[in-house]
Image (cartoon, helix red, strand yellow):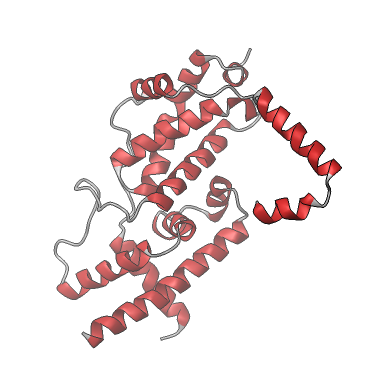
Amino acid sequence: MELLERFAAGDLDAFETLFREHQREVYAWAVRIVRDHGIAEDLTVETFWRIYRFRSRFDPAGNFRAWARRIATNAAFDHLRHARRETELPEDLPSAAAADPAVLLETRARIRQAFFQLPAKYQLVAKLALIEEEPYDKIAEAVGISPALVKVRVFRAVRILRKKLHSLNAEAVAK
Amino acid sequence: MTNKEDDKEIKAHLKSAFPPVQNTELRRDLWPQMLRKLDEQPAPVDHVPWFDWALAAILSALLIIFPGAIPALLYHL
């Protein structure tokens, strides 16, 4: 019996093999969305727990990698919906803020503030499309929507950000 | 400034406020953590308990006998 068939039948050894093969990829995808190593590790485990739980729904002839990425995206989306705001970037992630002038720092702070006010579904696609520059079809497959809808969500996210930034800038000028 | 230029500027600001994650390497094997989670929260058996079927049957029977209750039920859902 093939590995995926054994996994779908509930074989724990097959699940372990799949876990070890795909944990790095699932983690790398999750950390791009949540931008925190600890949370991404937890989400990786949560993703594989859901994968194991719903193994009977997996078609062994299907694409395990794509299925796992979609479940990881859902898990990360659930996290974004419930997190009050994203955690700050850990020290080992790149941050170009150190030597920048005060105005630029303030602009970045406003961008972050405006970004965290976006609905989670817009944050998700905006991060993947605009920051991580993932192709729309890959995002669409992971989120479970069409590439056209990804494009629409990115467009709306940018439009909302623009409005929020203008109002934040106006507030700053008024102070 | 046109909207297009504005959008480009927003994208540039966004990328500077959230630099792309470069270190995406997993630092440790997560299998032990996975095993702990499986022990703590064993995956539920993927079938519907008999009493759920019984409840569904009773509800269906009631709705067939009293179809006037359907709008009230829908209202309360």
Number of numbered discs on residues? 0
Residue A100 position in % (x across, y down):
17, 68
Residue at image coords 45%, 72%:
A160
* Left or right for B53, reference A139: right
Quadrant of the snapshot with the N terminus of chain A = top right
Relative height, residue B1 to residue B45 (above, below) = below
Q: Position of residue A12 (x, y in %)?
A: 50, 15
Nearer-the-camera pick, A79 or A103? A79
Which residue is depicted at the point 85% across and 42% down? B64
Residue B73 visible to the viewer: yes
Residue B49 or residue A54, whichever sits in front:
B49
Q: Would residue A56 be found to the left or right of residue B58 on screen?
A: left
Residue A69 placement, left or right of A88: right
Question: Left or right: B70 with respect to A153?
Answer: right
Rendered position, A38 above or below B42? below
Image quarter of residue A165: bottom left
Work out whether A32 lies above or below B12. above
Residue at horizontal 57 percent and vertical 19 percent from the top = A7
| Residue at left offset 40%, top offset 37% | A43
Residue A148: percent from left, percent from top? 62, 61
Q: Quadrant of residue A118?
A: bottom left
Residue B33: where, in percent of width, then height? 34, 24
Q: Quadrant location of the C terminus of chain A?
A: bottom left
**Residue A25 appears anywhere in the view:** no
